[in-house]
Image (cartoon, rainbow, N blue to C red):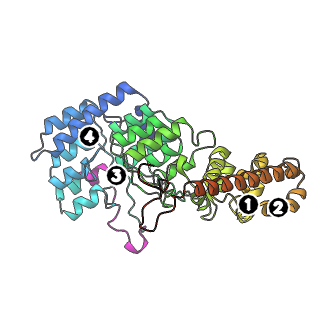
């Protein structure tokens, strides 16, 4: 990045900082975006009009811009063997250390092409080598690319983290990649779209998708864009904005490791491993209880045919410190929801087998009334017996009348015709 005109030699303001301030100013960003687009168009012409390039630079175009395909304009001037164009970009403070997608500096490229005049001009300006002269055995495995694209992508990520949707839009207008991925070491390489989804920001999600963000992109931990919705905080999980983003991603073909929409999730779905990067073993049941989404959990339980089991409640999560699902319910102070016929159906003995665990924990004991729970299950058992008896009676009443020997129904009394 450059301040769009030759800088004072003592000006050491970080180039990325200039971009951050630019993205925050709508009027300046719009002027530069226009000038940048004119510069890119001029550089992509089969014959470059140097006057058009200089006009664009004078009007504020960035001399570090990267052309489609990943080549900085300074490298493009070297590639064309145009020493006057090269001098023009250097005059307007182009980044001499910027590299292309292969990690090569402009001086590396000039040597590779044997562009003698270019080598002389770049060397006089202080341009460095990045590849030439380095032992390839000690170069990083991943090509180290540092140029305008990496800087504006960092600005986009910052706007996603702590800026507005307008900041995101302006960063995109200045060349940020809508599929940019975070580059911080040790992170899961989430894309800008993933991070916007995890923040439950509908406007940023729409802005990135409209700019071409890939709804099918997968994070470094294997999460899809829809999976990232389960990373939102407890306040936003399954809220109005959450459902808005779900519908947007679903309409664009986004897919999640969950097989159904939230309102259709079954107990079998919730017993599966949660589709986000916890420990790879924690169930969605445990995660949702921990997030306080008890209504969703209990609705899925009630839709199931069998309800929860003792095995479900005794399953531990290393991610949550080795606690059981029962412990998670205790901590939520909603343990009483578990001790109903909706959960246990007619499995009274199975429910009562949990009594030692409940009695051993004062917090749990205060939330559960086993006598009331037992009465609820017995009422359920009686209603089920009555329902089955009614079904059997209906089945008897609906049986067809017996047939005569000739196979016809005996609908009329026997006797003389006309009697």
Please say if the residues under marks 1 and 4 sit with CB atoms less than 8 Å apart. Answer: no
Q: What residue sits right under mark 2 in the picture? A: 354
Q: What residue sits right under mark 1 in the picture? A: 313
Give the structural element (helix, strand or loop) at label 3: loop
**Would residue 185 appear left or right of 59 to someone viewing this image?**
right
Dot 1: within a 10 Å radius of its alpha carbon, few (fewer than 14), some, or many (20 or more) residues? some
Nearest-to-viewer mark from 1 and 2: 2
Residue 124 drawn at (x, y percent): 28, 51
Please name the predominant secondary structure of the magenta segment in the image. loop
Mark 2–mark 3 distance (CA, rounded to whole Å): 66 Å
The answer to whether residue 136 is magenta is yes
Q: What residue sits right under mark 4 in the picture? A: 91
Nearest-to-viewer mark from 4 and 3: 3
- Tell which circle, 4 or 3, labels the residue nearer the N-terminal end: 4
Please say if the residues under marks 1 and 2 sit with CB atoms less than 8 Å apart. Answer: yes
- Tell which circle, 1 or 2, labels the residue nearer the N-terminal end: 1
Nearest-to-viewer mark from 1 and 4: 1
The answer to whether residue 126 is magenta is yes
**Would residue 319 appear left or right of 71 to someone viewing this image?**
right
Q: What residue sits right under mark 3 in the picture? A: 98
């Amino acid at each position: 990045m450059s301040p769009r005109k030759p800088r004072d030699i003592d000006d050491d303001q970080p180039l990325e900082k200039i971009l951050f301030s630019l993205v925050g100013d709508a009027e300046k960003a719009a002027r530069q975006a226009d000038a940048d687009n004119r510069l890119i168009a001029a550089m992509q012409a089969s014959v470059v009009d140097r006057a058009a390039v200089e006009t664009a630079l004078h009007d504020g175009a960035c001399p570090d811009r990267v052309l489609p395909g990943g080549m900085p304009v300074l490298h493009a001037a070297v590639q064309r063997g145009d020493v006057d164009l090269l001098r023009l970009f250097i005059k307007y403070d182009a980044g001499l250390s910027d590299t292309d997608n292969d990690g090569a500096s402009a001086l590396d490229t000039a040597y590779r092409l044997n562009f003698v005049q270019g080598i002389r001009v770049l060397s006089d300006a202080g341009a460095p080598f990045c590849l030439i002269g380095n032992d390839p055995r000690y170069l990083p495995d991943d090509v180290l690319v540092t140029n305008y694209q990496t800087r504006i992508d960092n600005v986009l990520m910052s706007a996603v983290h702590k800026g507005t949707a307008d900041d995101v839009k302006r960063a995109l207008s200045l060349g940020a990649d809508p599929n940019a991925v975070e580059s911080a070491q040790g992170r899961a390489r989430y894309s800008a779209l993933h991070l916007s989804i995890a923040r439950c920001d509908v406007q940023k999600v729409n802005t990135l998708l409209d700019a071409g963000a890939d709804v099918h992109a997968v994070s470094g931990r294997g999460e899809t864009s829809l999976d990232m919705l389960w990373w939102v905080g407890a306040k936003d999980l399954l809220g109005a904005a959450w459902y808005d983003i779900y519908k947007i991603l679903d309409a664009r073909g986004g897919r999640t490791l969950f097989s159904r929409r939230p309102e259709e999730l079954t107990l079998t779905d919730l017993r599966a491993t949660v589709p986000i990067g916890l420990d790879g073993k924690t169930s969605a049941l445990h995660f949702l209880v921990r997030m306080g989404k008890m209504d969703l959990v209990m609705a899925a339980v009630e839709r199931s045919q069998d309800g929860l089991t003792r095995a479900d409640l005794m399953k531990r999560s290393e991610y949550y410190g080795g606690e059981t699902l029962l412990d998670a319910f205790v901590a939520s102070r909603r343990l009483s929801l578990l001790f109903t016929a909706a959960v246990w159906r007619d499995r009274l003995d199975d429910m009562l087998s949990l009594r030692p665990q409940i009695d051993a924990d004062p917090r749990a004991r205060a939330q559960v009334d086993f006598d009331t729970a037992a009465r609820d299950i017995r009422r359920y058992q009686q209603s089920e017996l009555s329902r089955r008896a009614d079904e059997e009676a209906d089945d008897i009443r609906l049986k067809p009348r017996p047939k005569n020997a000739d196979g016809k129904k005996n609908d009329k009394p026997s006797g003389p015709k006309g009697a």
